[in-house]
Image (cartoon, rainbow, N blue to C red):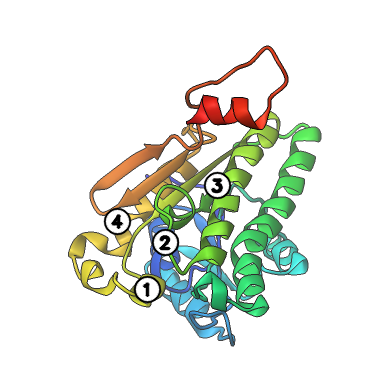
Amino acid sequence: MGALDGRVAVITGAGRGIGREHALLFAREGAKVVVNDLGGSNDGSGSDAGPAKQVVDEIIAAGGEAVANTDDVATFDGGAGLVRQAVAEFGRLDVVVNNAGILRDRFIAQMDEAEWDSVIAVHLKGHFTVLRHAAEYWKNASKSGEQVNASVINTASASGTFLPNAGQVNYGAAKAGIAAMTLVAAAELGRYGVRCNAIAPVARTRLTLATPGLDAMMADPQFDPSQISPLVAYLAKADCTVTGQLYAVQGGLISPCTGWQLGEQHTTSEPWTIDSVTAALS
């Protein structure tokens, strides 16, 4: 008996890298998987139905159940189509794993508008579109009397949370937004039976191998992308109760992240002035 028996999951960016490992593990553990991948290059250009189909073929050959999806989750209609396909093919939706992403690294002073917009669209908007349509589905199911037990796992990054990386202002901003989106979704959707968590993974993928300074580190076997997926499967389990949490995960390490916290407090009984602010913070 698998840990995810009977669960229906959509996984974005599942044609390669970490997303592929998610899809393969989910299927081995009994989930029915919609493998979403537009099949673009590292920078998001182009499309290719091959990667998603290859993963589906591999799952089916191993005795699992999966279908391919090549919708562009950076569009509102793409997110809707992905959710619709899961329900049409398998009769329900229990898990969303938002994983799709691209890189267009550039230092701030040289970044152009397209480099900013494309990364924000794929990461931040791409997470939102699938989350939004899945949330609508679960809300309607809950209000109709169904006992919903659903899970969302978003993909943030150290670059946007606890380890900012120069040259990735677009990527870091998107990933920080995803972390915040996860907390808001956890607060909103619990009433409908939906948990929402996020991971900040480090693993050997097309994107990390293309990031200057990471290629040597990524050669270490501990950074195999398959090391990330067990945590995601745990968070997707029907009996998992965790929600509103971000986990750093790489190799043999999993660590909950605490995020923004209030530090030392400075107070005044009088209106603040520049001088009093200077005295308090100096």
Name the residue: 39% across, 55% down. 201
How far apart in space, not on screen, are marks 3 and 4 (Cα)? 21 Å
Please state which of the two labelled residues, at mark 2 or mark 3, is closer to the viewer.
2
Amino acid, disc 4? Gln
Residue 77 in picture, x, y percent from top left: 77, 68
In-front residue for pair 74/51: 74
Image disc number at residue 211:
1
Q: Which residue is mark 4?
A: 227
Instruction: Specify few, some or many for label 2: CA neighbours under 10 Å numbering under 14, 14-19, or 20 or more.
Output: few
Please state which of the two labelled residues, at mark 3 or mark 4, is closer to the viewer.
3
The mark nearer the N terminus, 1 or 2, is: 2
Q: Which residue is mark 3?
A: 179
How far apart in space, not on screen, are marks 2 and 4 (Cα)? 23 Å
The mark nearer the N terminus, 3 or 4, is: 3
Residue 102 in picture, x, y percent from top left: 52, 72
Amino acid, disc 2? Asn
Tags 1 and 2 in contact by the CB under 8 Å rule?
yes
